[in-house]
Amino acid sequence: MKTALIQMPVVKDKAENLARAAKEIQRAARDGAELAILPEMFCCPYSNASFRANAEEAGGRIHTAMAEAARKAGLWLVAGSMPELADGKIYNTSFVFDSSGHQVAFHRKIHLFDIDVQGGQRFFESETLSAGNRATVFDTPFGRLGLCICFDIRFPELARVMALAGAQAMIVPAAFNMTTGPAHWELAFRQRAVDNQFFTLGVAPARDEEGTYVSYGNSIE
């Protein structure tokens, strides 16, 4: 399985993000990728205000654009994550599309990232987002894969559930920041891989030093 980790920059304009994602997916297909993975919240800046402003239902603009991108490229796509409107709530949700553009799975982030460091960073996803409640595995022509989002990787029990369900690899769209990234990013992926004897793949947004939330980047497999 040849995989493309699309570490793309994310800007305020949703249309620009969707166009860039589609372009990179096409490039991945031309380079022989069978599976492409986008970063967490690839469609909007990483802030509670942006989550609210860009939230859409499944079947909306973001979802449809990524389904079409997968179909046109003829590859499988883990479409990072997007703010999903459902049941009057907003979830951090990753949708998976097959090479025909059909949705085959989705994962709602279970563990929301709330941090308040004295003299440092304060960010509470739970002020806007609601938590998912299930582990996600899905079958592909390349084997059974597990899927979680960012802070989910910090919880070994979730990865173990996926491994016991037959996952041969775990995919993690993420946006670790410049505090957690240097301290935990590579360590977490190595830990989960060793614990469960499966592969781990992490995809982050490109680093933007001028943004309000700075991604650590360093996509990994």
Image (spheres, rainbow, N blue to C red):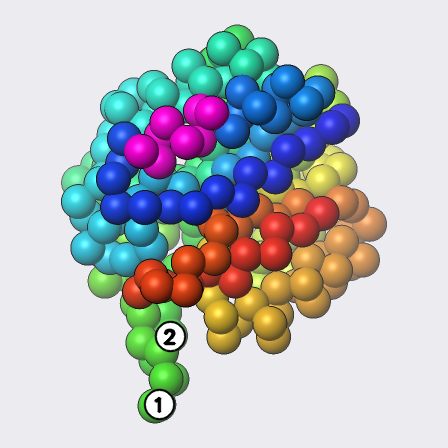
In the structure shown, which secondary structural element does the residue marked by tag 2 occupy?
strand
The one of 23 and 126 positioned closer to us in this rendering: 23
Tell me residue 210's x, y (percent).
Answer: 35, 63
Does 118 appear above or below 162?
A: below
In the structure shown, which secondary structural element does the residue marked by tag 1 occupy?
loop
Q: Which image quarter holds the N terminus?
A: top right
The one of 112 and 207 positioned closer to us in this rendering: 207
Which residue appears at 35% of the width and 30% of the height?
A: 18
Which residue appears at 55% of the width and 38% of the height?
A: 6
* Label 2 crowd bin: few (<14), some (14–19), many (20+), radius 10 Å: few
Q: Was residue 47 drawn as part of the magenta stretch in this picture?
A: no
Amino acid bearing label 1: Gln
- State left or right for residue 201 relative to residue 111: right
Tell me residue 102's x, y (percent).
Answer: 47, 14
The one of 172 and 38 positioned closer to us in this rendering: 38
- State left or right for residue 2 relative to residue 180: right
Does 85 appear above or below 178?
A: above
Q: Tell me the residue that label 2 is attached to.
A: 115
* Residue 170 position by quadrant: top right
Amino acid bearing label 2: Ile
Which region of the structure is painted magenta? 16-23
Which residue appears at 32% of the width and 46% of the height?
A: 11
Our reading of the magenta stretch's main secondary structure is helix
Tell me residue 70's x, y (percent).
Answer: 50, 18
Which residue appears at 78% of the width and 45% of the height?
A: 198
Q: Tell me the residue that label 1 is attached to.
A: 118
* Label 1 to label 2: alpha-carbon separation: 10 Å
